Amino acid sequence: MPRTRAHDADLVILGAGCAGLALAARLAEGDSGLRVIAVDVRTDYADDRSWCFWAGPDHDLRSIVHREWSTWAYQAEGEPARTHGVDGATYQYIRGADFYARYRAIIDASPTVELRLGVAAGSLRAVDPAEGGGVVVSTTAGDLTARWVVDTRPRRTVALLFQCFSGVEIDHGGALDLAALGIEPGAAGLMTGMRADADGLGFVYVLPLSATSALVEWTRFSPAPLRASAVRAGRDAALSSLGAPLGAPHVRILREEGGVLPMGRVPDPRSPRGNRFSRFASVPPAAHAASGTHGHPESIPGVVVAGAAGGALRDASGYGFARIQAWARDCADRLARGEAPVGHPPEPFVRRQMDRIFLQALRAHPERTADYFAAIARGVAPARLLRFLTDRARLSDLLAIIASLPLLPFLAQLPDRSRALATNSARRPDLVRALPRVRRAPSAAPSRRPAVQPAVAPEPTGDALEQVAS
Ligand SMILES: Cc1cc2nc3c(=O)[nH]c(=O)nc-3n(C[C@H](O)[C@H](O)[C@H](O)COP(=O)(O)OP(=O)(O)OC[C@H]3O[C@@H](n4cnc5c(N)ncnc54)[C@H](O)[C@@H]3O)c2cc1C
């Protein structure tokens, strides 16, 4: 008779940040009865980030929404701002500290879900079914065995573009000059002061939190991750232009946040199957070898990769919070029904293609990026653009976005057959002749500029931004 092995838990969750904590809490509040252990390398939670998303008035995180805006602005440098608003939706802001506290309280009250902090997970390995099956996770607090593992640890990512940002929440004593960026009273500034150059797009993100405080971020879309010092310099310049320079007596820093988000992840051909998007980075190379998985835990039966590492972030925007929450609810419901955990649903074909073409066009013509975003904000009805940003776009919304943009740079990014179809159906043979040569794949792109090659986020050392792809 095969010897069975008692697992430490039904499910072990690796990484208890946005995704891992949400899944653990959903399982705890659903009273599934499953034994769950969530481990995280951090020893405590800090107010390290905030999350924004669009939503209606009713949802189950409503009580921790700290601030919301019914209008939001886009503005390219030197042009008037476009202020958008959509009936029934607001742009909502949740503080990291409130999110962590709420979900930790739910987990603490559960007899079957446990959060272990200060525990770093390492390699994973499958257990022979004859030995009881499941997965062994090596951790700094010893091995853990489980039937299933959901791995949300951040990983290095190869991507078409990177969204590098540095922000600071400040008390400015009422001195913030929002009008300088065309931000109307009561509005949030999503992409303001947009300025593009040969290396990418920079813009200011401003969330006025009260009459005397605001979150101000400087963001760069660039083909390779930038040094933290460069992004911080952009942030400091933005604060100065808003009349709130750091170091001034009326400006006090309340907290800081920043990161590097991949936009348009590039599949990793070395991955054996399943989620093929990136290389496992939380574990040193020696641990990959020891695990026998070549750094791809998703190749082990019973292991699911989720969160930003599992493809939760929208390619074209880097937004992922709402998608992660929806996934956590779905995954917890399935587990409660006795099913296996699932990762994030694959991006529908049309959305994936739209996002890719858009990002390729941004990479091919970084100097025009501000014009593209300004054209969309000007030419697309707010409700249509919002549906696009929140994964609910209809065909007519996609067509409206396409119609707002200059055709040639985007057609040039289509694969051959689609390009022929598009130009033929538009009955514009002149377009066919005018089109530049097709870029078949990022790696095959003409090496006119080294920046056009997909880049990989650096190891988070030295001056590089620390939050790699999370
Ligand atoms: C500063 C910032 C602001 C953002 N703002 C928004 C926003 O406004 N709206 C939006 O939609 N998206 C936003 N995002 C994008 C996305 O929603 C977040 O990155 C989100 O936190 C991703 O969740 P996650 O669980 O995948 O990763 P994380 O929340 O980063 O969680 C990963 C966890 O894994 C842990 N970990 C790492 N290594 C190990 C290890 N070896 N063992 C155990 N644990 C480990 C980490 O400590 C961490 O707690 C933002 C991202 C950042 C960085």
Image (cartoon, helix red, strand yellow):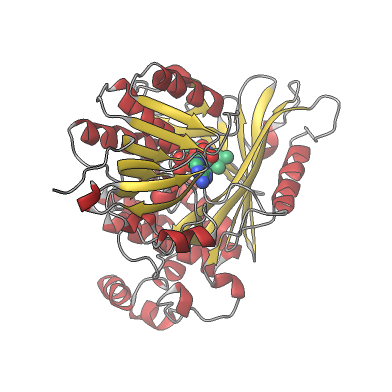
User: Left or right: 270 with respect to 378?
Assistant: left
User: Left or right: 409 with respect to 118?
Assistant: left
Count all numbered tags in the image, as a single digit. Answer: 0
Q: Nearer the viewer, residue 280 or 34?
A: 34
Residue at (50%, 37%) from the top-left corner? 40
96 relative to 288, above or below: above
Residue positioned most to the left: 1
Residue 89 image offset from top left, x and y in percent: 39, 28
Residue at (57%, 29%) from the top-left corner? 45
User: Left or right: 466 with respect to 264?
Assistant: right
Residue 88 visible in image: no
Residue 160 image offset from top left, x and y in percent: 49, 63
Q: Nearer the viewer, residue 305 or 230?
A: 305
Q: Nearer the viewer, residue 462 or 96?
A: 462
Figure quadrant of residue 214:
top right
Figure quadrant of residue 420:
bottom left
428 relative to 262, above or below: below
Residue at (31%, 28%) from the top-left corner? 27
Residue 373 image offset from top left, x and y in percent: 51, 52
Q: Nearer the viewer, residue 153 or 376?
A: 153
382 relative to 194, above or below: above
Residue 186 image offset from top left, x and y in percent: 57, 24
Residue 333 visible in image: yes
397 relative to 41, above or below: below
User: Left or right: 149 with respect to 76?
Assistant: left
